[in-house]
Each structure stands twice: as C-alpha cells, then as structure tokens.
C-alpha cells in the first residue's frame, strides 16, 4: 500500500517536472497549453491505473521488490484449470498478504491440493521455498508441509509435603 502511494507521488512529481519544462521551453503557446493539459489528464489516469492494479494478481515473474524473499506461507489458492493458479501468500516481514498468479501446471495444482489437505488434517501450514525463482524448463513449485509446533509438556508436579496437625510425629 505504501509503495503504491510513493509510486504515485513519484509519477506526480515527474509529470509536474515535464509540464514545467514544457511551459518554460521556447515552443508555441498552443504546445505549452497542450503539455499542461496532457499532464492534467495523465495524473488521474495514473491514479486510476494504480488503484486498479491493487486488486489484480501479480505474475510471480514480475515481482522485483521482494524477489529476494526465500520463503512464503501459503494462505490460500484458487485453481483456474488449464489457465492459471492464483496464490495468496504471506511473505516474511510483510504484514499484509499478497496476491500472485502462476501459469497452469497440473503437477503444481495437484501438489498444492495434496499438501493443503494434509495441513488441514494435521493443523500445519504449507510454505513455498523460493516463490519468485525463475522456473525455466517447467520447474515445479518448491512446496513443503510444516508441522505445527509441539505443545510444551508441563513437568509433573510432585505434591509438597503438608503438615497434618493430627499426626503426632514431628
């Protein structure tokens, strides 16, 4: 979310600079007015485009800023058979989940379904190692099932000796 706001601020600054350059240049008045008008059209279009992108899944191969992340928790997925696999991932050090799309691969879809059933049955999670690695030659997803952490066992407490007033032994 913050990155989109910064990106829009950058687009706004660049378009304002370009409009300023056009106004100060020695071109005709019509061209200067046209440059300012185009800048006025560009700003709302850029805002609408960025706002529309928020709800669209990002292709895994187009992730540039978080490409170095080596592990992601799978929160959910949706299969569009023979078209795409949609993933909802939580990346490390990122509070909000991210929405990605992968090209369809039957083996990946089967593996996702199998590991998700196992995670639901045993209460674990499914993680994807290197989710943004290039998969040339049809390489498959690197999925793994992570068991839930074992509950700590409480040590057995031995009852403390108590004093019985009726007992004559001291």
Image (cartoon, rainbow, N blue to C red):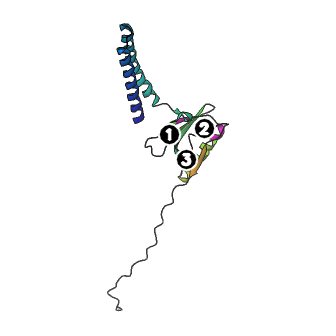
Q: Quadrant of the C terminus?
A: bottom left
Give yes or no for contact between labels 2 and 3 (Cβ–Cβ under 8 Å): no
In the displayed image of the protein, which residue is found farthest to the left?
165
- Residue annotated with mark 1: 66
Q: What residue is drawn where x is 38% and y is 15%?
A: 22
Q: Which of the 4 image quarters holds residue 165?
A: bottom left
| Residue at (56, 51) in percent of width and height | 121
First in sequence: mark 3 vs mark 1: 1
Q: Position of residue 74 (x, y in %)?
A: 53, 44
**Residue at the spot of label 3:** 127
Q: Earlier in the sequence, mark 1 or mark 2?
A: 1
Q: Residue furthest right?
A: 137
Q: Disc 2 or disc 3, which is closer to the eye?
A: 2
Q: Which residue is mark 2?
A: 134
Quick one: label 2 or label 3, which is nearer the N terminus? 3
Residue 168 at x, y percent in the picture:
34, 92
SS of the residue at dot 1? loop
Mark 2 surroundings within 10 Å by alpha-carbon count, few (fewer than 14), some (14 through 19), many (20 or more): few
Q: Position of residue 18 (x, y in %)?
A: 39, 20
Is 68 above or below relative to 54? below
């Amino acid at each position: 979310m913050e990155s989109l706001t910064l990106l829009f601020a950058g687009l706004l600054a660049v378009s304002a600079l370009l409009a300023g350059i056009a106004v100060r240049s020695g071109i005709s008045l019509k061209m200067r007015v046209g440059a300012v008008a185009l800048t006025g059209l560009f700003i709302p279009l850029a805002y609408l485009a960025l706002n529309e992108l928020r709800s669209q899944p990002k292709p895994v191969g187009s992730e540039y800023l978080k490409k170095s992340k080596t592990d992601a928790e799978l929160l959910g997925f949706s299969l569009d058979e023979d078209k795409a696999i949609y993933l909802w991932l939580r990346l490390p050090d990122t509070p909000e989940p991210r929405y990605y799309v992968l090209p369809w691969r039957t083996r990946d879809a089967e593996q996702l379904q199998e590991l998700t059933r196992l995670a639901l049955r045993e209460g674990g999670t499914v993680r994807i190692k290197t989710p943004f690695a290039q998969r040339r030659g049809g390489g498959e997803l690197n999925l793994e099932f992570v068991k839930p952490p074992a509950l700590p066992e409480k040590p057995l407490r031995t009852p403390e000796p108590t004093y019985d007033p009726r007992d004559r032994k001291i």
